[in-house]
Amino acid sequence: MSILAAKGLKKYYRSQGGYFLRGRQFVRAVDGVDIELKKGMTLGLVGESGCGKSTLARLLLRLEEPTAGTLEIDGTDFLALRGGELRRARRKIQMIFQDPYSSLNPRLTAGSTIAEGIKIHKLARGAGVERRVVELLDKVGLPRAAYSRYPHEFSGGQRQRIGIARALAVEPDIIVADEPVSALDVSVQAQVINLLADLQSDLGLTYLFVAHDLGIVEHVSDRISVMYLGRIVESGPAVELFSLPLHPYTEGLLASIPSAKPGDRVRVAISGDVPSPVDIPAGCAFHTRCPKAFDHCSTETPQLREVSPGRYTACWLHVD
Ligand code: SF4
């Protein structure tokens, strides 16, 4: 069953000096994206920085309003909600941020930070609030003593655990984790990923896991969607996408994972930088960096289409 379904989501920003850029005066950060999350699954959303994945994550929580598209959460039209209705519905979908330090209020103790949502949504009262906070601290692997400590007294990994407890405090169904481990030491990354996996099986959570590195999402995702310049260019079951990527951009991202196993096919890493979203290349947006580009690629845009059951790609190489 689908717990979140977004169709044709777009977010365009007016660019600085756009008045003079006739015909391309918008930054197309997200440009017609469909996302479906089934209950209890993890979707990995991957792409280099500047590909629009964090903007897409923010649209799903309505931290930003989309320019176009539809968004249903648990069968409700999420974009039609206002005021108290929106506040209540927001409980269902929570975010874990990339930088656990800047996302925590330095003047609030861990206990007060976690208690905020519990109080706002009246999920407990009086001594029950503190009991619930202690329970959440324990769930994310922090001691009771953490309750009265401030963010600067914790390590990066511990701060991210507080961020996770804060998200869990309002009993959400969906967690959007925006690069949740990329600011952490490599040794701590695995611990936080394992914690998220344990919480998912305990609480039946659904995850959208945003990362710039395919290696991070490999073991946690059921499906993976790859994003390039505001669009999904490939989507499919994680195992299949890793063993046989369809889109040259996915191949390039795989090539940049350092720990290729012996026997893995040698892939060519992507060269160059992501073009500016103000001036997206015509045709296939990836053609300026694609080692397999041919004439047609720079003139017509390939649409995302299903090329085998459950596998989608937007590349002319996979069109008959
Ligand atoms: Fe490369 Fe052409 Fe496929 Fe785009 S459509 S990814 S440029 S081969």
Image (cartoon, grey):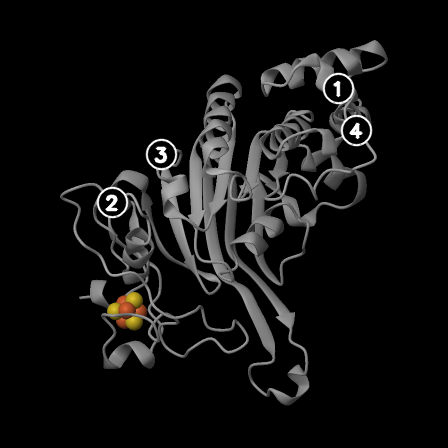
The amino acid pointed to by label 3 is: His
Label 4 lies in ligand 1 vicinity (Cβ under 8 Å): no
What residue is shown at x 56% (from left), y 53% (from top)? Answer: 54
Sooner in the amino-acid sequence: mark 4 or mark 1:
4
What residue is shown at x 43% (from left), y 69% (from top)? Answer: 273
Residue 147, labelled with which disc?
A: 1
Looking at the picture, does residue 8 appear above or below residue 38? below
Horizontal relation, residue 188 to residue 88: left or right: left
Distance from label 2 to label 1 (Cα)? 42 Å
Distance from label 2 to label 3 (Cα)? 14 Å
From the viewer's perspective, is the residue at label 4 or at label 1 nearer?
Answer: 1
Distance from label 3 to label 4 (Cα)? 33 Å
Sooner in the amino-acid sequence: mark 4 or mark 2:
4
Label 1 lies in ligand 1 vicinity (Cβ under 8 Å): no
Sooner in the amino-acid sequence: mark 3 or mark 4:
4
Is disc 3 in contact with disc 4, using a CB cutoff of under 8 Å? no
Residue 260, labelled with which disc?
A: 2
For label 4, the residue is 116
